[in-house]
Image (cartoon, grey):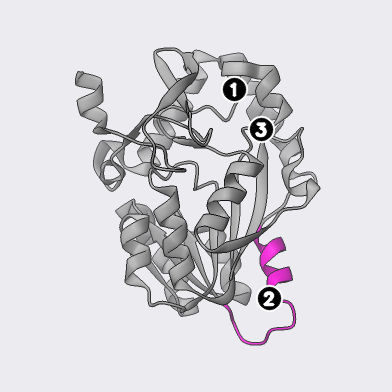
Amino acid sequence: MMQRAALRLVDRVCPGCGGGDRRTAHAFEGHTIVACRACEFIYLPVAVDPAIFAAGAFAWENANAIKLKNRRQKSPLRTRLDMATRFRTKIAKKTPDDYLRKAFAGRGGRPRVLDIGCGAGGYLAALAVAYTPFGVEISSELARAAQVICGPAGGEVLAMSSLDGLAHFEAGGMDGVVLRSYLEHESQPKPLLSGCHRVLRAGGVVVVKVPNYGSLNRRVMGTKWCGFRYPEHVNYFTPASLARMARETGFAIRQSFFDALPSSDNMWAVLTKV
């Protein structure tokens, strides 16, 4: 109970359909991941109150440092091998810009692109070359760093939760939204996608990257799969469940075979506002 109180965990219903009837999908190390009996969405039945990541000991940048330290202590050999072979992820590596450039091909001007969970603005720095970059970041310290990048390029970074940040922007004011390694962390993914739909112009796009729960590697690795991260990852998408949530929030989804390879731990998708 003390750990639950310290992390400010809140109970959840199914993010996919709002149902409360569920079964255990995975149980390991005292954690339980469930599957909705109605729609089969896979999720964590509790989530950390996002306000805890804004500042202090649990600020997002500190939480990441703690996570890496725990990984090194728990699986030192595996962590060292992973860090030493990071070059493998750079081979044919995709970025959101690969998808944005295709979506905006032939358009003039500087499209307005919003990065949700932008961190210290590393990706926004790349966006600033061809786009007007905006960001939302829960960590006040990281948001200040990102603002240094966005401000001179005509953009803005908001230090607040993603849902509050989306509500700040005018309807139809954005050309694109980036959800890169973010949607798996969001305790309210469906309202978040609805918020993205509201801020996008007609034909605007959301570029999504999430862990692929449907991957063959997850089936082989079981509970040791790299996509299982407690308590950060609260949603576990498959290509089918991501497509369903996209359609239910007003988007058409484009996802090629190579965007969701069965052998890959991650998948990409482009959601277009219709």
Q: Residue at position x 30%, y 55% from top?
A: 140
Which comes sooner in the sequence, label 1 or label 3? 1
Q: Which mark is residue 214?
A: 3
Q: Nearer the viewer, mark 2 or mark 1?
A: 2
- Depth check: give the residue in front, 49 or 95: 49
Amino acid on which disc 3 is placed: Gly
Q: Is residue 159 visible?
A: no
Please name the residue that numbered disc 1 is placed on.
Answer: 79
Q: Nearer the viewer, mark 2 or mark 3?
A: 3
Q: Secondary structure at mark 3?
A: loop
Query: Looking at the image, is 256 positioned above or below residue 99?
Result: above
Residue 34 locus on image (x, y percent): 46, 25
Amino acid on which disc 1 is placed: Thr
Quadrant including the N terminus? top left
Residue 11 locus on image (x, y percent): 29, 32
- The residue lying furthest to the front in this view is 38
Q: Residue at position x 74%, y 48% from top?
A: 259
Q: Is residue 222 visible?
A: yes
Q: Residue at position x 52%, y 37% from top?
A: 39
Amino acid on which disc 2 is placed: Phe
- The residue lying furthest to the bottom in this view is 108
Query: Looking at the image, is 90 positioned above or below residue 253?
Result: above
Distance, label 2 to label 1, CA atoms, is 39 Å
Distance, label 2 to label 3, CA atoms, is 30 Å
Please name the residue that numbered disc 2 is placed on.
Answer: 104
- The residues colored magenta run 96-111
